[in-house]
Amino acid sequence: MTFDVAAIREQFPILSREVDGKPLVYLDNAATTQKPQCVIDALVDYYSTCNSNVHRGAHRLADEATQRYEGARDIVAGFINADCREEVVWTSGTTEAINVVAHGLAQLLKADDEVLVTEMEHHANLVTWQQACKQAGATLKVAPICDNGELRVDEFEKLLSDNTKLVAFPHVSNSLGTINPVKQLVQLAKKVGAWVLVDGAQGIAHGAVDVRDLGCDFYAFSGHKVFGPTGIGVLWGRKSLLEEWPVWQTGGEMISEVTYQDARWNELPYRLEAGTPHIAGAIGLGEAIRWFSELDFDGMKAHETALMESATRQAEAFEGLTIIGNSPEKTGVLSFVMDAGHPADIGFLLDRQGIAIRTGHHCAEPLMNRLGVPGTARASFSIYNTLEEVDALFAALKKVQMMLA
C-alpha cells in the first residue's frame, strides 16, 4: 500500500466527525491512536460469528476463535521479528507487560543488586522497578537527561556496574518525543551482563521494530498505541528467560497439572497468560498490525518528519510559547508551555475549537519536576494527521493566546 494520507484518513471513521460544529483535529495520539475500519470490523466479526473461549472448547466456535487468536500471535511475532511465536505473551498493555517482568525480578533481586532507569520514564516504567527494588532491598538508579530531553549516555554508562541486574528505558519518550539510541544502550548494558527491558509503547507505531536487531531481552507495547483495541498488549521476551521467569498470575490456562498440594506450570506462552484472555483484543491487534505492516514505512517516516518539522518551525516562531523537549532525535510529540496560561486552560480552549490534545504531567511527574514545569500541553501526531491540521493547531493557539491575555 502506498502512503497516501487522504486514503489512509478515509479508513478511520472517527476522523470525519465534528466537535462543537468544527472538524475534529485529533492530536492526542501518544495517549491512544484511532482505529481503522478493518480493526473495527474484525472485532464485530469475532463477536458476531465465532464468539467463544479459546483452546479448550470441543466445538466449532471455539476452534475458529482459537485459530484467529493464535493467528494474531503469529502476526505479532512476525512483525517484531521474534525468534518464535512462544516469545509473544499477551498482556492488557505495556503497564501489565512491565509488571510481569518486575514481579518476577523482585523475586530474583538480591540486596546488592541495582536497577537502572532514566529521568524520562513514564510512571509504568519507574514505579514498577522502584517497588521491586524496595521489596528486595535492592537499589534503583536513575540516569540523567540533558535540559533538551536527550539522555546523557555518558552518565548512563557510568551508572552501570557489575551489580546492575536490569536496565529499563523507553524506546521513545511519551512526554518529550525523544528517541533513545536503543541499540547503543543495550550494548552498554550487556557489557555488565544486565537484562534490558525496552518500554516500546511510543516506539511501536513509528515503524518496524526488530527485537533481534535491538538486542534487548524484553520489549513491551500496547495495542491501542498501534491502531489496535484498548486492553490488549504484548510482552516479548527471550524464550530462555520467559521459560524460567517467575509466574505473574495463577489460574486457568497457565497450569498443566494441579493437585490439592501443588501445581505445575504450562509451557510458553501460556504459563504467563492466566485466565480467559482478551480474545477480541488480540484478534483486533493482529488485524491492526496486518494493516499497519502493509503501509509504505519510508513514506510514513517522511510524512511524520514533515509534520514534526512544520510543528517545530511554527512553535519556535510563536511568541510566548516554549517547546519542552528539543532532542535532535525525536518523533511524534510536541510538548510546550505558554506564558498566557496553564496547560489545562490551553487544552480546554483548544477543545472548543475541535482540537484534541493532552495536558498535565503525562504520567511522568518526576520528569516534569526535573524540567521545572508543572506539566505541558502535548500535541502528538500520527500517520493520518496532515500539515493542514498542524496549521490549524497554531491558528487555534493564537486565539487561545488572545482569550487568555
Image (cartoon, grey):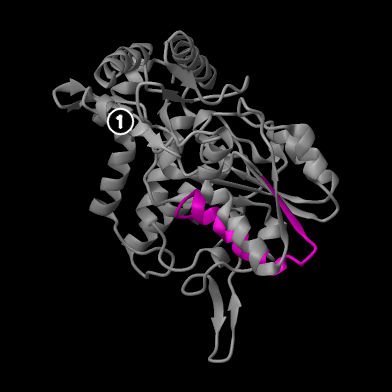
Q: Residue furthest left?
A: 21
Q: Residue furthest bottom?
A: 260
Q: Could you tell whether 361 is left or right of 62 in the image?
A: right
* x, y percent for residue 67: 43, 54
The magenta span reads: 91-117
Quarter containing the N terminus = top left
Quadrant of the rendered image containing residue 310: top left
Estimate how packed mark 1 is, as few (under 14), some (14 to 19) or many (20 or more) residues with alpha carbons within 10 Å: some
Quarter containing the C terminus = top left
- SS under mark 1: helix
Residue 90 in magenta? no
- Please tell me which residue is depicted at 40% across the width and 32% down the height of the picture: 29
- Please tell me which residue is depicted at 63% across the width and 27% down the height of the picture: 147
Q: Is residue 124 visible?
A: yes
* x, y percent for residue 222: 47, 45
Q: Could you tell whether 114 is left or right of 305 in the image?
A: right
Q: Is residue 85 above or below residue 143?
A: below
Q: Could you tell whether 132 is left or right of 185 in the image?
A: left
- Please tell me which residue is depicted at 37% across the width and 15% down the height of the picture: 390
* x, y percent for residue 239: 68, 56
Q: Amino acid at mark 1?
A: Asp
Observer-nearest of 107 and 395: 395
Q: Is residue 223 above or below residue 308?
A: below
Q: Is residue 169 above or below residue 339?
A: below
Q: Could you tell whether 244 is left or right of 384 in the image?
A: right
Q: Is residue 89 visible?
A: no
- Please tell me which residue is depicted at 39% across the width and 15% down the height of the picture: 4
Residue under numbered circle 1: 345
* x, y percent for residue 54: 40, 63
Observer-nearest of 264 and 108: 108
Q: Residue furthest front?
A: 405
